[in-house]
């Protein structure tokens, strides 16, 4: 009987895998690289004079290197890596903000939107004004913003501060307002950059988690770039590890996070003068 149970379990796993494989691919990156070319200006007046008629030096930075990736409809896909590994550049290439280098292709099926807490936020404006500014950046019409304005204020718990400039808000108040606006976005694919960074206190984090699941995750495709490994571990179906613009591995969250920790540990011990534990 034990053998039959194992066989049944394996069959169910294979069926789930087959169903996942049949889902539509909504994001496809083929041979995607991104190179930034930075002109090196002369630092001193003497250098400027002597180099006046010389061609300027151009430094190339390879932010992404030959990324090949497919993400399925409804998948929650995480991207991790140290600072400068290319995570945010990858998200911007997906969004079309940066074009890939020649020969690279990016295919996106469905309406997509990049979400980053505070994107388009102006601290000199009031909460009321920032709702209209930020929500319009997210693609909402003036009619939609007016209809949702009071709900946004209520969710952010800022009823008494509607006409207060955001620069006078505490970090928690700003974070609540940012989140309350961001969850109003409507798209098939969300490209999220550190979306949960500093959302608020523990009580609001609990509320925002529920809202996040109901308003954004349900039925949508998510690509989440984050240093918050517990958030990645909790939400993601698959995770990709980037290092110096190159894809190291893709797999189950725990496996990829463990590989990230292993590489970070090795890197720490390679720093000159670092004493091993």
Image (tube, rainbow, N blue to C red):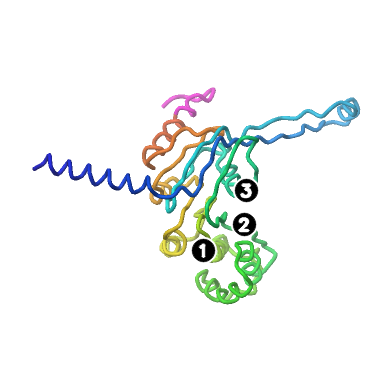
Tell me the crowding category of disc 1: few under 14, some 14 to 19, or many 20 or more residues within 10 angstroms, Cα based. Answer: some
Q: Answer with the quarter of the image where residue 203 lies.
A: bottom left
- Element marked by disc 3: loop
Which residue was labeled with disc 3?
96
Q: Report whether 76 appears left or right of 151.
A: left
Asked whether 268 falls inside the magenta stretch, the response is yes
Q: Alpha carbon of mark 2 to alpha carbon of mark 3: how far?
A: 16 Å
Q: Alpha carbon of mark 3 to alpha carbon of mark 1: how far?
A: 22 Å
Q: Answer with the quarter of the image where residue 134 lies.
A: bottom right
Q: Report whether 126 appears left or right of 53.
A: left
Instruction: Assess whether mark 1 and mark 3 are in contact (beta carbons under 8 angstroms).
Output: no
Q: Nearer the viewer, mark 2 or mark 3?
A: 3
Query: Measuring 44% from the left and 45% from the top, which residue is drawn there?
Result: 229
The disc at residue 119 is 2
Q: Which residues are magenta?
A: 266-277
Q: Earlier in the sequence, mark 3 or mark 1?
A: 3
Q: Earlier in the sequence, mark 2 or mark 1?
A: 2
Which residue was labeled with disc 1?
183
Query: Measuring 63% from the left and 39% from the top, which residue is drawn there?
Result: 100
In what quadrant of the picture does the N terminus appear? top left
Instruction: Assess whether mark 1 and mark 2 are in contact (beta carbons under 8 angstroms).
Output: no
Q: Report whether 274 appears left or right of 93.
A: left
Look at the image and tell me whether residue 116 can be seen.
Answer: no
- Element marked by disc 2: loop
Q: Alpha carbon of mark 2 to alpha carbon of mark 1: how far?
A: 13 Å
In what quadrant of the picture does the C terminus appear? top left
Asked whether 213 falls inside the magenta stretch, the response is no
Look at the image and tell me whether residue 270 can be seen.
Answer: yes
Tell me the crowding category of disc 2: few under 14, some 14 to 19, or many 20 or more residues within 10 angstroms, Cα based. Answer: few
Where residue 191 appears, as percent x and y from the top left, is: 53, 52
Query: Toward the viewer: 182 or 42?
Result: 182
- Element marked by disc 1: loop
């Amino acid at each position: 009987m034990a053998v039959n149970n194992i066989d049944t379990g394996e069959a169910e796993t294979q069926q789930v895998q087959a169903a996942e494989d049949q889902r539509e691919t909504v994001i496809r990156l083929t041979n995607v690289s991104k190179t930034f070319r930075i002109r090196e200006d002369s630092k001193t007046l003497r250098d400027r004079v002597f180099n006046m008629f010389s061609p300027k030096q151009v430094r190339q930075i390879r932010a992404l290197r030959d990324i090949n990736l497919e993400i399925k409809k409804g998948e929650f896909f995480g991207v991790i890596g140290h600072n400068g590994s290319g995570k945010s550049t990858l998200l911007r290439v997906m969004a079309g903000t940066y074009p890939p280098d020649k020969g690279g292709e990016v295919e996106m099926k469905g309406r997509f939107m990049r979400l980053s807490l505070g994107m388009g936020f102006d601290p000199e404006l009031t909460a009321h004004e920032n709702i209209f500014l930020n929500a319009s950046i997210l693609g909402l019409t003036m009619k939609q913003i007016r209809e949702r304005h009071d709900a946004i204020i209520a969710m952010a718990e800022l009823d008494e501060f509607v006409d207060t400039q955001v620069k006078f808000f505490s970090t928690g108040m700003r974070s609540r307002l940012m989140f309350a606006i961001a969850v109003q976005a409507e798209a098939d694919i969300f490209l999220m950059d550190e979306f949960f960074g500093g959302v608020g206190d523990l009580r609001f984090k609990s509320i925002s988690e529920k809202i996040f699941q109901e308003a954004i995750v349900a039925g949508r495709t998510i690509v989440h770039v984050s240093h918050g490994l517990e958030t990645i571990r909790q939400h993601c179906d698959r995770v990709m590890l980037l290092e110096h613009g190159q894809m190291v591995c893709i797999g189950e969250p725990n496996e990829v996070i463990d590989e990230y920790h292993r590489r970070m540990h090795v890197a720490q011990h390679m720093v000159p003068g670092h004493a091993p534990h």
